[in-house]
Image: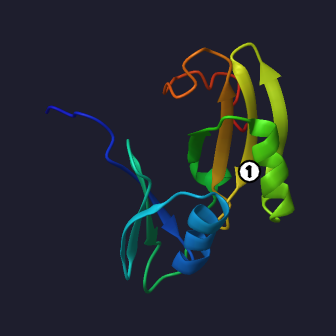
Amino acid sequence: MNIKKVGNVILAVKDLDKSLEFYNGIIGLPIKNQRRSWIDLGTSGALLSLHPASLTAQHSGSSIENGITIGFLVGDVQSAVDELKSKGVTIYRDIIEKDIGKNAIIQDPDEYLISLFEPIYNDKDQQTGGYHGFTPA
């Protein structure tokens, strides 16, 4: 096997329209591709893909129950949290600061956890395993 990179992070969602409004309208991820039951969001790197949990069965489980957390790098976590609060987004854990940066955790409409990370290192766009100490639990 020769895996080159992560292509998509796929979220099973209860309500595709509600999740699209959250990730595109509120968070600001651009729509790359959209079909009736699949939406790809993002422009570079791994895409966030939304898909109905099931067209016939009820969605169950949240991030806390299934262990899923999505991480976004942000330029200014305080302004991001302030903006999201003003839009009615649930703040799961307010900003904490550690030696590698600042972090807050919000929830999407399906109660998936989203980590907002503002790194303190020079390359602010660098992907990192630097979430140590920022897990939701």
Give the residue at x 78% y 56%.
84
Q: Quadrant of residue 119?
A: top right
Give the residue at x 31% y 46%.
7
Residue 70 horizontal/vertical position (percent): 56, 46
Residue 23 horizontal/vertical position (percent): 58, 62
Q: Is residue 98 depicted above or below 24 in this figure?
A: above
Camera-side residue: 12 or 96? Answer: 96
Q: Quadrant of residue 104?
A: top right
Residue 109 horizontal/vertical position (percent): 67, 67
Q: Is residue 67 visible?
A: yes
Residue 13 horizontal/vertical position (percent): 53, 69
Give the residue at x 80% y 43%.
79
Q: Secondary structure at mark 1?
A: strand
Q: Is residue 119 depicted above or below 69 in this figure?
A: above
Give the residue at x 64% y 57%.
27
Residue ID for mark 1: 106
Q: What's the residue type where badge 1 is placed?
A: Ile
Name the quadrant of the N terminus: top left
